[in-house]
Image (cartoon, rainbow, N blue to C red):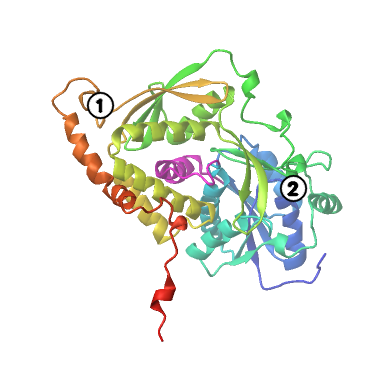
Amino acid sequence: MNTKQKTQVKKVVLAYSGGLDTSVIVPWLKENYGCEVICFCANVGQGDEDLTLLEKKAIQSGASKLITHDMREEFASDYLFPMLKSGAVYEHKYLLGTSIARPLIAKHLVDVAHQEGADAIAHGATGKGNDQVRFELTVMALDPRLKIIAPWREWDIRSREDAIAYAAKHNVPVTATIKSIYSRDSNLWHISHEGGLLENPWNEPEESMYQMSTSPENAPEEGEYLTIDFVTGNPVAVNGEKLSPAKLIERLNAIGGNHGIGRVDLVENRLVGMKSHGVYETPGGTILLFSHRDLESLVLDRDTSHFKEIVAVKYTELVYNGQWFTPLREAIDAFVNSTQGPVTGTVRLKLYKGNIISAGRESKFSLYREDFATFGEEDVYDQSQAEGFIRLFGLSMKVRALNGLPVSGLDMPQPDYSRFKRD
């Protein structure tokens, strides 16, 4: 362990969860920087932590105080719902639960640093993961004068076993054990699981690992119907009951988790370049994404819907990479919000053993017209006109065939360059 004193920092605000990593960081900061350590705990819906016990643990670890902020409603309304409306999903599976929480936590971390007169912030993200980028980009965007300390990039601890040993040496109370170690991150939107047997992507996750959802095999034998009401893209009610953003997500987590909804096993590409294997549980978020898309299919025109899918890919990258506080993310939000006016209505779903099944959708802004879509006799659409449209739409294909050219450009005959040789 590096014991050289670093006196350039006087007061540090540490993003503190009370878990193994952040617990050992407290004495490490004091030992290596000789600074006061203030712990900051962000309540983003990770569970009903006993704040009295958490404060006692932080003080026991060497912190001067613990500051907590309840950010659940802000998280839901200002971060989760905008992301939901964008349609962002990373690599077709990951609903970005950890990614989207980091800018919010870092924003409050900076606010606390200002209030407490701190000259640095610290976080427990490792040097191999994405979170270090997300935390630090946010701090850079909001106050680049603050020093950022990332112990995992400095200390000699290289494993969770090392961290447990360090905690024991410094009398830091921890709950992790060597026999059963999962690296978890939970909040209002999801819970993630990494490490342990998941380090081998061939291994199937053990059922005892899951915390938010029952297995589909053990889910109820009867399906459950529910309705979700949306106003301008934002979900506002479940089964007709109006709920605050955070309460609505909590309600859907309970309902979806009971039916085994929202489990994802993913080998993903981290921002830092390596692959990682993680398992995510996002019951409420999975239901909301499905229902929001279902309603959009009814009310958005084709070009807007298709372009929005393209934009969602970039929005996903910005969230995953920690680029929330950027002009581009704000610009995309402005576009997305401009599309959400008609996304007002009700979606009916059926949940059954891990499946979400569409059971109906309605909106006063619906673009669906039965008289347009029917194959029967009608006046609004003359089917004979389709012939001219098809002829024009396929004209380039027809010309290609008339010229005897293959469909694939790779199969094009090579030109005879010998004709162009000069004497």
State the residue lying farthest toward the top. 222
Residue 288 makes an appearance in the image: yes
Q: Residue 376 lies in magenta, yes or no?
A: no
Judging from the image, what secondary structure is the residue with disc 2 in?
helix
Q: Which residue is mark 2?
A: 20
Residue 58 pos. (x, y %): 70, 49
Mark 2 or 1, closer to the camera: 1
Residue 356 pos. (x, y %): 49, 25
Picture quarter containing residue 156?
Answer: bottom right
In the rendered view, does 226 fall on the left or right side of 4?
left
Q: Residue at x 32, y 54 (%)?
A: 403
In this picture, is 92 found above or below 138? above
Q: Which span of residues is magenta-colored? A: 69-93
Q: Which residue is mark 1?
A: 373
In the rendered view, does 204 fall on the left or right side of 252?
right
Front residue of 58/343: it is 343
Residue 152 pos. (x, y %): 72, 60
Residue 56 pos. (x, y %): 71, 44
Front residue of 155/97: it is 97
Residue 175 makes an appearance in the image: no
Q: Are marks 2 and 1 in contact (CB under 8 Å)?
A: no
Judging from the image, what secondary structure is the residue with disc 1 in?
helix
- Badge 1 crowding class, 10 Å Cα cut-off, few under 14, some 14 to 19, many 20 or more, is few
In the rendered view, does 20 fall on the left or right side of 161?
left
Q: Amino acid at mark 1?
A: Ala
Front residue of 6/90: it is 90
In this picture, is 423 found above or below 164? below
Q: Amino acid at mark 2?
A: Leu
